[in-house]
């Protein structure tokens, strides 16, 4: 326990060296369950530090892009093995710095391990194509090339998994990286990078700069030598990034959240649906872009489902995620705590029934942390603000419907399209839902959380800009296609003109 309470003071990691911010300023990362526990003190960087990091990434680019793909994959595989060996240590760090309960933190690290092993295998796969030419004695093929220096800006809710989704494929494709982890989870982000460094990644291929989104994040986005931006975060921030990248004709991938729904039909296994709703709504204290924040329930099973959900939710224990009997940890910071509570006020004002929770918890050990009680609203209409806007906390709403068609309508009624789910034992309903639910991810008889790295992750509508992370085509997001023609005829041939008859 003494080791867990150590306070670290690392610098920005640029070209393999720790460096203070040019300004000399710092900020603290604190334990959201024990606010008096300072996890670390980090550089509060500015645009000049980003410029230094970009120069280091540019210097490392020629050597890294010429490194054979299998050799890159071997380094990533070693990094995944290092993460695997340190899984428990990293999970405990994550619980301390981010707050999710230990079992979930282990899952976060495991996702990064899985992603590393998955991407490492791409180093030996055929990654181009050959196609027939229309002319004789001419060869046509494609190959991938890196984009250059790329910027990766990640949030706090999956502080090791999400960096792995971006950084592993970025470096596999031969890019070098400037990485800004969230100011709420800087040590988790640095710990991920350290695994790659220890695996043999050359200095400068990844450069970590700590600081605010307004200063450091914007400096990465607007830097003329950064070729692409990979961002997960809020919609408003994403729109600003998209506008700047559009102005600069810069590639950008955005994952911006969701307002995900579970539809529970009258023929569903109600106990299974309650299990899914409980996990989907309150896992990670609701701080997932895929959280099940809307429960769309057929009136025929509404009373039974609601009662069982409320009974189960009442028994959830709040507390520090390192304690074995804790079900729900803290929310990330005081600002987010106030935001979550403001939505409870909004829901009551809109006429929804607050059936459970809706309080900032401050009894005993909870007084030193950012804890919010699991909250359930009933009698919610689809046009209500609490049914339309992403709360990003342990709050879910129950919306009654009279038919399968109405359930689909309610499920598709928000600006987002990340993850939707249906519980039904009717095969016809299941297949219609697969086709008609407007989301990048659809689950049948499972909650809206639980994506696996071998399938694409991302959504439709205002969830992002259509790009995908993970899955078999992930390298498309991190590389450029080059088309190559080799004419060995020994004479001029003109495509679309010569017939070679």
Image (cartoon, rainbow, N blue to C red):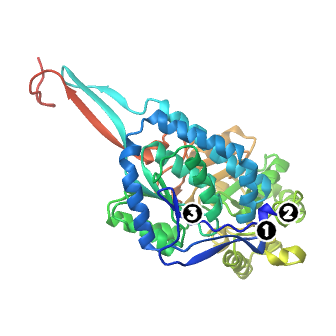
Q: Name the one closer to the observer, 282 or 141.
A: 141
At a point 65% along the width and 44% down the height, the residue shown is 82
Q: Are marks 1 and 3 in contact (CB under 8 Å)?
A: no
Q: Are marks 2 and 1 in contact (CB under 8 Å)?
A: yes
Q: Name the one closer to the observer, 106 or 9.
A: 9
Q: CA distance from mark 2 to mark 1?
A: 9 Å
Is 80 drawn above or below residue 141 in the view shown? below
At a point 11% along the width and 22% down the height, the residue shown is 490
Q: Is disc 1 surrounded by few (<14), some (14 to 19) or many (20+) residues within 10 Å?
A: many
The x and y percentages for residue 53 are 44, 62
What is the total number of numbered labels drawn onto the structure image?
3
Q: CA distance from mark 2 to mark 3?
A: 32 Å
Q: Quadrant of residue 319?
A: bottom right
Mark seen at residue 181: 3
Q: Indicate which disc, 2 or 1, sits on the residue closer to the N terminus.
A: 2
Quadrant (top left/top right/bottom left/bottom right) for the C terminus: top left
Mark seen at residue 313: 2
**In front: label 2 or label 3:** 3
């Amino acid at each position: 326990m003494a080791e867990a309470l150590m306070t670290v003071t690392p610098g920005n990691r640029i070209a393999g060296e720790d460096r203070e911010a040019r300004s000399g300023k710092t900020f603290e990362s604190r334990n959201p369950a024990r606010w008096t526990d300072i996890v670390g003190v980090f550089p509060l960087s500015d645009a000049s530090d980003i410029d230094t990091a970009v120069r280091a990434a540019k210097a490392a680019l020629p050597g890294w892009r010429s490194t054979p793909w299998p050799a890159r994959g071997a380094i990533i595989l070693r990094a995944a093995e290092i993460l695997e060996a340190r899984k428990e240590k990293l999970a405990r760090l994550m619980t301390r710095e981010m707050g999710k309960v230990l079992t979930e933190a282990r899952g976060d690290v495991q996702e990064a391990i899985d992603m590393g092993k998955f991407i490492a295998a791409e180093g030996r796969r055929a990654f181009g194509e050959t196609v027939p030419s229309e002319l004789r004695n001419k060869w046509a093929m494609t190959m991938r090339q890196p984009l250059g220096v790329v910027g990766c800006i990640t949030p706090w809710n999956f502080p090791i998994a999400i960096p792995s989704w971006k950084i592993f494929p970025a470096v596999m494709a031969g890019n070098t990286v400037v990485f800004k982890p969230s100011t709420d989870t800087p040590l988790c982000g640095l710990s991920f990078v350290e695994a790659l460094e220890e695996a043999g990644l050359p200095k400068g291929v990844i450069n970590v700069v700590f600081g605010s989104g307004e200063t450091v994040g914007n400096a990465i986005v607007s830097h003329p030598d950064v070729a692409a931006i990979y961002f997960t975060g809020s919609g408003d921030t994403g729109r600003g990034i998209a506008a700047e990248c559009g102005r600069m004709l810069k590639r950008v991938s955005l994952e911006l959240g969701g307002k995900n729904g579970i539809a529970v039909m009258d023929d569903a296994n109600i106990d299974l649906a309650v299990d899914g709703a409980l996990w989907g709504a309150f896992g990670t204290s609701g701080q997932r872009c895929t959280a099940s924040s809307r429960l769309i329930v057929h009136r025929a099973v509404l009373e039974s489902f609601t009662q069982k959900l409320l009974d189960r939710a009442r028994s959830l224990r709040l507390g520090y995620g390192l304690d074995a009997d804790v079900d729900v940890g803290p929310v990330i910071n005081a600002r987010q705590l106030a935001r979550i509570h403001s939505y409870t006020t909004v829901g009551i004002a809109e006429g929804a029934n607050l059936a459970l929770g809706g309080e900032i918890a401050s009894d005993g050990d909870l007084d030193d942390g950012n804890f919010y009680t699991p909250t359930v609203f009933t009698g919610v209409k689809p046009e209500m603000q609490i049914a339309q806007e992403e709360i990003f906390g342990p709050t879910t709403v129950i919306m009654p419907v009279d038919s399968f068609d109405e359930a689909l309508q309610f499920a598709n009624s928000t600006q987002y399209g990340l993850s939707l789910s249906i519980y039904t034992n009717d095969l016809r309903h299941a297949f219609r839902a697969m086709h008609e639910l407007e989301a990048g991810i659809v689950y049948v008889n499972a909650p809206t959380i639980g994506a696996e790295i071998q399938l694409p992750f991302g959504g439709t509508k205002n969830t992002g800009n259509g790009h995908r992370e993970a899955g078999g085509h992930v390298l498309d997001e991190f590389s450029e296609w080059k088309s190559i023609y080799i004419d060995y005829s020994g004479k001029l041939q003109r495509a679309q003109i010569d017939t070679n008859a």
